[in-house]
Amino acid sequence: MAGHEIPEPADRKRPVADPTVTPLAAEETRHACDPVFRHGVVVGFDGSTSSERALAYAIGMAHRSGSGLIIVHVANRLPTTVWAGCEPPVFVDVPDHRTEVLGLELACADYLSEVPWILVERGGDICHELEEVGREYSADAIVVGSTHGLVGRIFGSVAGRLARRAQRPVIVIP
């Protein structure tokens, strides 16, 4: 779901596939993402207060740098051992309609009109998925909100784990 789409000029023709080119070579020439979002700002967003503060900071950062904003929502994944009691644990995607709701809320938000943005849904470990999206878009930074409470103390905060393992700057917003 894109919050801001850039229309293609009517006079731009799409290249026709050359039957003599091997599929591997064709894949190498294709860009991984829209150039507007290349070197953009990745922000983790789940609708919480801390993620809203992180989003506000990321919007300002993207606006100042003239880049796009990649908003990432990581959907829930739970081990099947919760339901089936099987070994080893296998992870399954739990239906998460929260991304659709967040997308609609963001599409109606006036504060996002200043920057081009997209909403990316992923499933899995939050740290891994944020770093993966950052790698795919060659992001200049990843912005996340800080985790407060018992869960962060027991399992470690997403921000702390991401800061230790990320290959790009991580900005943690309190």
Image: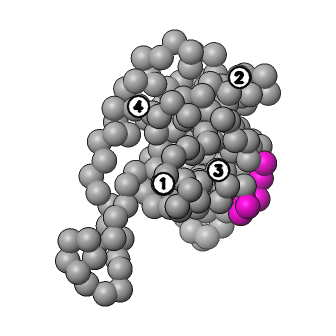
Up/down of 81 relative to 171, above or below:
below
In contact (CB < 8 Å): disc 2 and disc 3: no
Specify the label residue 60 is tagged with.
2
* Residue placed under numbered mark 4 in the picture: 103
Mark 2 or mark 1, which is nearer the start of the sequence? 2
Determine the residue positioned at 62% across, 33% down.
Answer: 54
Q: Nearer the viewer, residue 130 or 46?
A: 46
- Secondary structure at numbered mark 4: helix
Q: Position of residue 148 (x, y in %)?
A: 55, 44
Q: Amino acid at mark 2?
A: Gly
Toward the viewer: 110 or 54? Answer: 54
Q: Which residue is mark 3?
A: 159
For marks 1 and 3, the one nearer the N-term is 1
Q: CA distance from mark 1 to mark 2?
A: 29 Å
Counting from the top left corner in percent of width and height, residue 119 is at 49, 37
For the residues bearing labels 1 and 3, Cβ distance under 8 angstroms: no
* Residues at marks 4 and 2, CA–CA distance in whole angstroms: 19 Å
Q: Calculate the distance from the C-alpha at mark 2 to the C-alpha at mark 3.
A: 20 Å
Residue identified by numbered label 1: 151
Q: CA distance from mark 4 to mark 3?
A: 23 Å
* Amino acid identity at mark 3: Ala
Most extreme residue toward the left, as rendered?
84
Name the element at disc 3: helix
> Is 7 included in the stretch rendered in magenta?
no
Relative to 69, 118 lies left or right: left
Let me know if residue 17 appears in the view: no
Q: Quadrant of residue 105?
A: top left
Callout in the foreground (1, 2)? 1
Amino acid type, callout 4: Gly
Q: Magenta region: which residues?
A: 164-169
Q: Earlier in the sequence, mark 4 or mark 2?
A: 2
